[in-house]
Amino acid sequence: MQFLLAFIVVAPLLGSAAALLPAPPGLKGKSPEQAVLRHGVTVTGVILAAAIALTLGFDHDAPSRFQATTDISWIQALNVRIHLGIDGISLPLLLMTALLFFLCALYSYFKLPAGPSAKAFVALLLVLESGTLATFAVLDLLLFFLAFEMVLIPMYFLIARWGGAQRQAAAWRFILYTLLGSVVMLLGLLLIGLNSGTFDMVTLASDNGRELSHTTQLLAVLSIGLGLAVKTPMWPLHSWLPDAHTAAPTVGSVLLAGVLLKMGTYGFVRILLPATPDGMATFAPYLGAFAAVGIVYGSLACLALARKGNKGDLKRLIAYSSVGHMGFVLLGIASMTPTGVNGALFANIAHGLITGLLFFLVGALKDRYGTADLDTLAGATGAALYGRAPRFGAFLAFAAVASLGLPGLAGFWGEMLALFGAFDPAEGLSRPAFLTYMAVGAFGTLLTAAYLLIVVRRVCMGDPKAGPELAVADIQHYEFAAWTPLVALTVLAGLWPAVLLGLTDPAVQKLLAGGNS
């Protein structure tokens, strides 16, 4: 178990270095490009297999205990250690990350985005995987920061070199926003570590903020929270996201929505809730307010983009939908209750599966039509995917109803639990304020249903003979292979939520109890 976790974190880096080397003569296949793409599928597949083995070996009777731990001294002067471990909070995120990277590598093997070099693409993809996996596995504040920053450069180049129109501006906006947020976050992490005498997350969680003054906790929550809020992204720090998603290649959008956004909300749960509880209690009403506004703002922006005549880009629309969905995650965290935090963690996984599927589908739709503009796709009567490509239309309709929170699918449980958490927030928080946030969030679910159903009507329905004069291929075999696991897991999590909640709930209970089970 200990070796498996270390292997999962380090192996992508080794695979990235190997991707830049010439392929051995017997493994070149038809071309060097095919060889390096096959290398990417192999490495991400091995990482996924290791993550599944780690999950099977995980002691599911003790999900609140850190397992597969490695604890080695690294920088003695600062008491920084190479400390790795997983519990019921981080294991689902680790497994979902490994799955999404494998599916993206598999998809890219058949549909590589236009760009300078397949070698560079695979190498950057594997560096990105290592950084994201490390973020969910490390248990030291400075290592967390290094892993958090490690993903920025690969994602910048994936957008800037393999993206679409306006990719340079979008990539610069992404890197500037996240770097500025990270600088502020580093100050907060140093403030906690130097004032408490340790950077170890397990020790800080057990201490539950007793070594930190109220002022120190306030400053730490403000600075770290700002950095995490940019990555989440929380309204009004979200403006980099629509541009990045619109310009990114398909797999870049999938990973950005499915994995990178989760790093921000994970930081709130793993660091701020247990280490600075008093500071979080002070800022929780404001966090809840921003979350509630983000839910409605994201939905209204999507409604505007979905309306006929507004030239709404489907990738941009799904990006704004992420602002709304992540608002539910932040609302659950702001409630500071086991119900709300469990809902936030569930919504994290649900969003990664469903929105990852949506970006796969919209990317494939753009490849077929040459545009993601909703008005161009829909034409006068609708794009009529049900008639032109029925399986493609069925996948898109499924992803849409899953995203709007249909009961029985994964999107329902996280949002419902987040609203329940806001209904009865933690002791000391203003219940009237959180009841207001709950009502606003519930209204946001109606808006979400409205814009997604409009998208389904305009893209899936209509007269097949009246739309754009282009033949639309139905789902290809590699698309079916890449998308079906996300559909299956969305159904599984929706019908059997205990699969996730059985892991997260004991760990959350211990986290909020100050390290005591």
Image (spheres, rainbow, N blue to C red):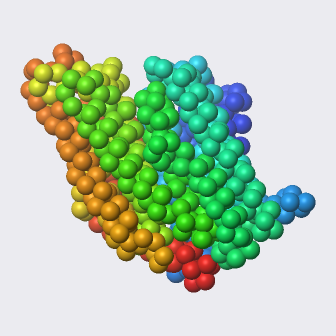
Q: Residue at x 60, y 66 (%)?
A: 279
Image location (x, y in percent) of residue 188: 70, 55
Q: Residue at x 32, y 48 (%)?
A: 296
The furthest residue to the top: 469
The answer to whether residue 303 is above or below residue 262 is: above
Q: Quadrant of the C terminus?
A: bottom right
Of the pair 376 and 173, the residue shown nearer to us:
173
The furthest residue to the bottom: 517
Res. 517 in view: yes
Quadrant of res 67:
bottom right
Image location (x, y in percent) of residue 237: 50, 42
Image location (x, y in percent) of residue 389: 20, 32
The answer to whether residue 43 is above or below residue 332 is: above
Q: Residue at x 45, y 19 (%)?
A: 165
Q: Residue at x 33, y 28 (%)?
A: 313
Res. 158 in view: no
In this picture, residue 421 sits left or right of residue 469 = right
Quadrant of res 74:
bottom right
Q: Quadrant of the N terminus?
A: bottom right
The answer to whether residue 439 is above or below residue 146 is: below
The answer to whether residue 286 is above or below residue 164 is: below
In this picture, residue 187 sits left or right of residue 386 = right
Of the pair 323 and 98, the residue shown nearer to us:
323
